[in-house]
Image (cartoon, rainbow, N blue to C red):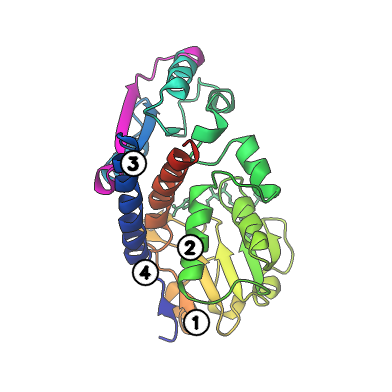
Amino acid sequence: MKAQIIDGKAIASQEKAKIRKEAELFNEKYGRQVGLAVIIVGEDPASKIYVSNKIKACEETGIRSFSYRLPESVSDQDVINLIEELNKNEAVDGLLVQVPLPKHLNEQKILSHITVDKDVDGFCATNVGNLLLSRECNKACTPAGIITLIESTGVDICGKRAVVIGRSNTVGKPVALMLLEKNATVTVCHSKSKNLADICKTADILVCAVGKKHIVTADMVKDGAIVIDVGMNRVDGKLYGDVDFDNVSEVASYITPVPGGVGPMTVTMLLNNTVKVAYRGK
Ligand code: NAP
């Protein structure tokens, strides 16, 4: 194997150690813990796992977590009332509502009530707009984690040709903007793109966020490229990325595994955003 593995687990744990120090300093200086509130509605098993991972990560980093479990039967207004209350709560620096919400709720309407500063997921229109305008903001967590992973290689993003496959609002578009902010030359591909393989082959940095097992094969990757695999595809109980890891690692210089690459960074960046918000408020 030629490529070096970018160990997301190890990098996440180093980042968490830094976050813990900053959270402890905050507590010493301002006499309270940094706080993250998480609202979960209903009984979706995957959402429950994500929320419990977030709470566990808060414990590891000295961040106080506030968790609110609402029954499936709540109305939009019930959730909005809780959000409004937490918006005013000074012990809460970051606030998130675990998505997807049950179908009868208006997700966009509910999420739009989270105050911009406390939107640590970085999904609200103002945070996304500020990212576009290169202003200080809460940056979406998975894309911010991807940038940290790329930077961990020591390779300078500036001037590199980056190709992002996927244009979702939560991964593809924000990571493309973040790469552009770092002065990469960025191309975004999607399901209607023609000659995907040829475009990918030009990439010094290839980020794949599609959700299709092994859509990126070795013949699509430039020799020496950095390959970041965001995909999480469960097939017959096993987790696969979007990248054909075994063969692509013979061509790339650096590659993220699945699992253990991008995944561990997402919650870490959420905590990072929360601590930053706490300091910004002082
Ligand atoms: P999404 O909203 O479904 O977006 C998928 C994107 O892939 C769309 O832009 C789509 O294009 C594009 N696409 C689909 N088929 C394609 C093809 N054949 N060629 C090129 N592009 C194609 O997914 P997402 O939320 O961005 O997530 C992507 C993957 O990342 C999923 O596997 C998800 O589970 C994973 N993920 C992982 C983490 C993590 O923490 N590790 C976080 C978020 C997501 P169109 O826009 O044209 O439809």
Query: SS at mark 3?
Result: helix
Give the Cα distance between marks 3 and 1. Answer: 43 Å
For residue 79, say whether it is visible.
yes
Q: Quadrant of the N terminus?
A: bottom left
Which sits earlier in the primary sequence, circle 2 or circle 1? 2
- Dot 1 corresponds to which residue? 253
Query: SS at mark 4?
Result: loop
**Would you say the residues marked 2 and 1 are in contact, meaning their CB atoms lie under 8 Å apart?**
no
Give the Cα distance between marks 4 and 3. Answer: 34 Å
Residue ID at (35%, 57%)? 18
Give the Cα distance between marks 2 and 1. Answer: 17 Å
The crowding category of the residue bearing disc 2, from other C-alpha atoms within 10 Å (few below 14, some 14 to 19, many at least 20), is some
Give the Cα distance between marks 2 and 4. Answer: 11 Å
Which sits earlier in the primary sequence, circle 3 or circle 1? 3
Extent of the magenta region: 57-77
Point out which mark residue 7 bears: 4
Query: Looking at the image, is mark 3 or mark 2 nearer the viewer?
Result: 3
Residue 40, compared with residue 78, is above or below; it is below
Query: Which of these two is toward me, 176 or 251?
Result: 176
Which image quadrant for residue 34? Answer: top left
Identity, as a three-letter code, of the amino acid under mark 2: Thr
Residue 2, compared with residue 7, is above or below; it is below
For residue 242, say whether it is visible.
no
